[in-house]
Each structure stands twice: as C-alpha cells, then as structure tokens.
Image (spheres, rainbow, N blue to C red):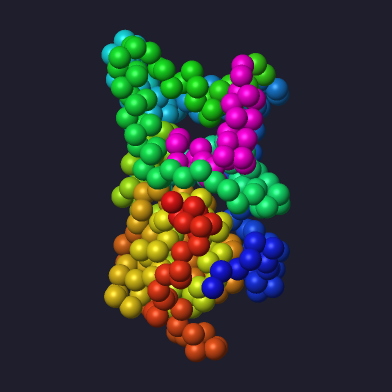
Amino acid sequence: MRTPIEHLGRDALEVKGWFGAYKWLILRRASQIGILGLFLLGPFAGLWLIKGTLAQSLLLDVVPLTDPLLFVQILASGFFEIGTTTVIGAAIVAAFYFLIGGRVFCSWACPVNIVADTALWARRRLGIRQSARLKPSTRYWVLGLTLIVSAVTGTLAYELVNPVSLAHRSLIFGFGIGWLALAAVFLFDLLVMRHGWCGHLCPMGAFYGLIGARSLVRIRADNRAACDDCMECYEVCPEPQVIPPAVKSLASGGSPVILDGNCTNCARCIDICPNHVFAFGLRFGSQAEAEPNDTGHTGMAAWSPPPARPEQERLIA
C-alpha cells in the first residue's frame, strides 16, 4: 500500500500534532539557517565568531575548519602548499562527521539542501512525476572525476563549479555566480530528476558518505514491527534505498539500524511515521522489537515488496 501524495503526512499530523510531525525538519532548518547566520554576523554585524566559508574557516580566531573534500583536492592537485592549519582543520571536520554521520553535513549544514527540498516540494505541488534515472552510485564516479581533474590540471577544479562554495560566497560576500548555481540545482531537481543533484551527482555528498560510513549516530527502526507499509518514509527520504535493509529484515532477524553511509540522518522518516517506527540511536546495541499494534498488524514481519510502479522505480533508483 502506498499513500497518495495528497495524503502525505496526514496520519502523522493526526497522531503527533503539527510540531511532532515536523520537529526534525524544523530543527534542521534552524541548524542550516543558524550556521549561515554565524557566517553572516561578521560582514553584517562586525561580530566575527567565524571567518571564511563552509570550504575553509576559522572559529573564534582559534579553531580551523576545512572541508575534507577541499583538502583532498589540494592533495590531488599537488600544486598548493598545505599549511598546518589546513591539515588540522580537515582532521577536525572529518572526525566530527565520522562520529555523527558524514551526510549529516548534507541535511543539517549545507544550504543547497534547502533548495533541493524546495524543488521536491514544488514537484509535488505541480504534479511532476517524470524523472530522469541515474543510479545513486553515479556520485562516486563524479567524485573520482573531480579528483582526477584536480590532479591533471593542478587546480581545485571542482571549487569553480561547486554550488555549495559558490552559494556560500554569494550569500556572505554578496558577489559571484552562486545564485545561478542555486537556480541550476533547483531547475534540475524540479524539471529533470527527483533528488537529482544531492541524491545522485554531488561529489561532496559522496565524500561525506564515505567519511560517515561507520559513524556512531544512526537512524534505527527498532519499532519496525509496527510498520503498516504506507511507504510514506520512502516518499520523503532523499535516499530511499537505505531503508529496506533495516525495515524489511524483521523476519530474518536482520539489524534494525540504517547502516548505509548515504543516509543523511535528516530524520524525515521519523517525522512522517505515525507508528513511531524510526528514531535516532546508536550504531551498536539493540532494543526489543515493538509488539503488534492494536489491529494485530506486525508490519514488516510479513512484508514483501509491492509490485513496482514506474514512479516507485524512479524513487528508489
């Protein structure tokens, strides 16, 4: 069974109330806007808590922070001198995302995520169902190509087109083509491909996914016995292919933890599920499976994939 788009989230609203159905989304937006606000305090208010951009910055004039992908591009180029602060900054950021999940950057810090989510909302409102098809693994080929181009040209080639860096520079310093980059991502996701940029092409997402592949903080489906197969979590998840291994393996005793490094820990599955199937937890340890719900339905214990529909194939592809 799959919930029609016009009914998406209705059960969660009835069971949890408005805040409960959007709690993690609200917190994510607060995080994204708050991080951007910290960068804007300097140029607009003269309060320099953090200087620079998401690519490379200095926190409180003491703590260096460097995007790990930028650092690897520097190594690949073999042209730029690598300072100690750059190395330390990359190590700090990599260690942080190694612990909490690399793609947490994508859903809790990256400003492009807001654009991608807006494009998805617009697709639903406009009833756009057509979507190009690429495998999510395509982003790893793009990542490899990024490093090859840096090595061949001796430049930080991706930073010239990176929508995250371009957008951040434009938002903070008020110049550049960042607005065009954001518009391109929006139109691509809206008209060409569902979850197109962030879910299939972005090399930053691929790299952070590799960093967080063994991270401690995870989404868990310990209450998966209560799943009623509504498929709403698939509809809102930017990486729906990560859900089945955790949710549908109840009968076989498989782990209820979403272990795929591509999970962004966006928690939309937590918000949208009225049966409280999902929750934040740790990678290790286990919790008792939930008892059957009031109707006696044990959800994924007897679940098998429904016949694939074109839209569902595009969603999971």
The residue drawn where x is 53% and y is 66% is 231
Q: Is residue 75 left or right of residue 16?
A: left
Question: Residue 251: which quarter of the image?
Answer: bottom left
The residue drawn where x is 65% and y is 72% is 11
Magenta segment, which residues? Answer: 176-202
Q: Do we see residue 28 in this rendering?
A: no
Q: Position of residue 222 (x, y in %)?
A: 42, 71
Question: Residue 149: which quarter of the image?
Answer: top left
* 189 part of magenta stretch: yes
Q: Position of residue 259 (x, y in %)?
A: 35, 56
Q: Is residue 271 left or right of residue 301?
A: right
The residue drawn where x is 43% and y is 22% is 158
Number of numbered discs: 0
- Residue 211 vertical placement versus 72 (above, below): below
Q: Position of residue 157 (x, y in %)?
A: 41, 17
* 192 part of magenta stretch: yes
The residue drawn where x is 64% and y is 30% is 183
Residue nearer the viewer, 39 or 123: 123
- Residue 177 vertical placement versus 272 (above, below): above
Q: Do we see residue 246 in this rendering?
A: yes
Residue nearer the viewer, 244 or 285: 244
Q: Quadrant of the N terminus?
A: bottom right
Residue nearer the viewer, 41 or 300: 300
Q: Secondary structure of the magenta portion, mostly?
A: helix
